[in-house]
Structures are given as structure tokens and as C-alpha cells.
Image (cartoon, grey):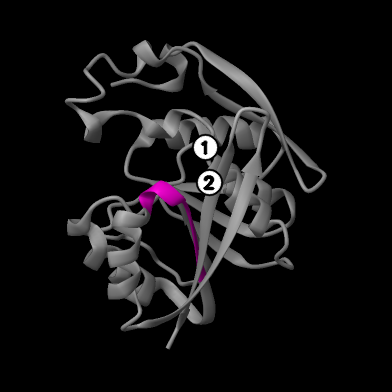
Amino acid sequence: MKTVKNLTIEKEEITVRGQTLKIFLPAKLEEIFQGDPFLEVEKFPFWARVWESSLVLADYVATIEPPKKILEISAGLGVPSLVAAKLGHKVCATDFEKLPLEFIELSAKENNLNVETKILDWTNPDLSEKFDLIIGSEVVFRKSLFKPLIELFKNYLEDGGEIILSHPSERKRTLIPFLHEAQKDFKILTSIRKLKSEEETIEIILNKLIKN
């Protein structure tokens, strides 16, 4: 079983609304994945880099007045969770795998932050409390998980709470059917954020879900 101790790691500095954090991540992809990324998409460790959608989600979280109880699902390297913790929120970062959670724990320690981590299977969630805010970036990717994800939201969101999801615009084909299903139980608000660099402009879709 792979652990952080067995891997070559590197550190990346990220600044979100004036808050600077040091984030640990795997330095060598081949140490955590030896397959064909085209043939084994579901096994590919997409969590092993900082994606634009997680930065946009972290930026949004940085605008929320603390303290809130926040659950991040499929947290990966946990940038939104770490930003939230730095701003004074009570945070539980979850993922289906243990390894990304170890990186979050390492980053939390490096930044002197308190972030709870927990393995979470959406089809059989084991959570003991409800949350004011449930957040996730690039979490809608498979139709078979639509129902478990919506049930998770319904069961673990506090009354008056909000769900914030962040996805790149190329995920629309999967995201739109999910939102159509979710609107039976939630009011859905959508906004578009654009990240510009010299090479490209990346469009990120932010969705806010509020219980009907």
C-alpha cells in the first residue's frame, strides 16, 4: 500500500485572496500510477495535481464568513479545505482513497492548520454530523453516482446550508444531467468564472445548491 512516506514529494505555494499556503503533492506520477491513463481512466490519480476548478472553489470559500462547518468531498489535495481552515472554518476533508488525505494532513501540518480527514464512500457514507457547507470540485463525473451524491447532500446538509460545486466547462455533458436531477430537491444557481493566462482562458462553472 502506497503512503506519503514511500513517495517523492514536492511543495507548491498557492495564494488565494491574500492567504498563502504551502501545498504538498506527488513529484513523480509514475510512483503512484503505472497503468495506461487512456485505458484505466478510473484508476488514474487525477487528485495528484492542483486543478483550476479547485482554485476557483477555494477562492469562493474565502469569501464566506467563518466559522462554518464545511465538508469537502473528493478533496484530492484539499486546497479549498486548507484555505477554509486558515480562515477559521471547521473543516472535514474527505476522499475515497487514503493517499490524498495523507497529503492534506501533511499540508495542514506544514501550515499549522487543523483539518479533519476521513475516507468517504458516497454509496455508503459514514458521517456523524451535518454541515453548513458541502463543497466539491470536479465531483460530477459518472451517471451511476448521481443518486448517491444527491442523497449525500440531502442527508448531511444543515437546514439553511449550501452546496458549492466547481467544474470546468468541458464537463457540461455530465454536469447538466446531474443538475437536472438535483433540481428536484434543490434550487440551483450558476455563475461562470474565467481564469486567464498567456496561453489560454479556462472557464469554470460554479453551482450553488440550496434545499427546496
Cα distance between the residues tagged 1 and 2: 5 Å
Which percent across, then down, holds residue 90?
62, 59
Quadrant containing the C terminus in the rendered view: bottom left
Which percent across, then down, holds residue 178?
30, 66
Q: Which residues are magenta?
A: 163-171
In the displayed orientation, state which residue is furthest to the right: 18
Secondary structure state at the residue bearing disc 2: helix
**Residues under numbered marks 1 and 2 in contact, where contact means CB atoms less than 8 Å apart:** yes
Q: Which residue in the protein does label 1 denote?
A: 51
Magenta region's main secondary structure? strand
Which percent across, then down, holds residue 56?
61, 50
Q: Amino acid at mark 1?
A: Trp
Name the residue rendered at 73%, 62% in the picture: 63
Q: Quadrant of residue 39?
A: top left
Name the residue rendered at 26%, 14% in the picture: 34
Q: Nearer the viewer, residue 77 or 144?
A: 144
Please tell me whether residue 81 is drawn above or below residue 105 in the rendered image.
Answer: below
Q: Which residue in the protein does label 2 denote?
A: 53
Query: Mark 2 Cα within 10 Å, few/some/many (few <14, many 20+)?
Result: many
Name the disc covering residue 81, or none.
Answer: none
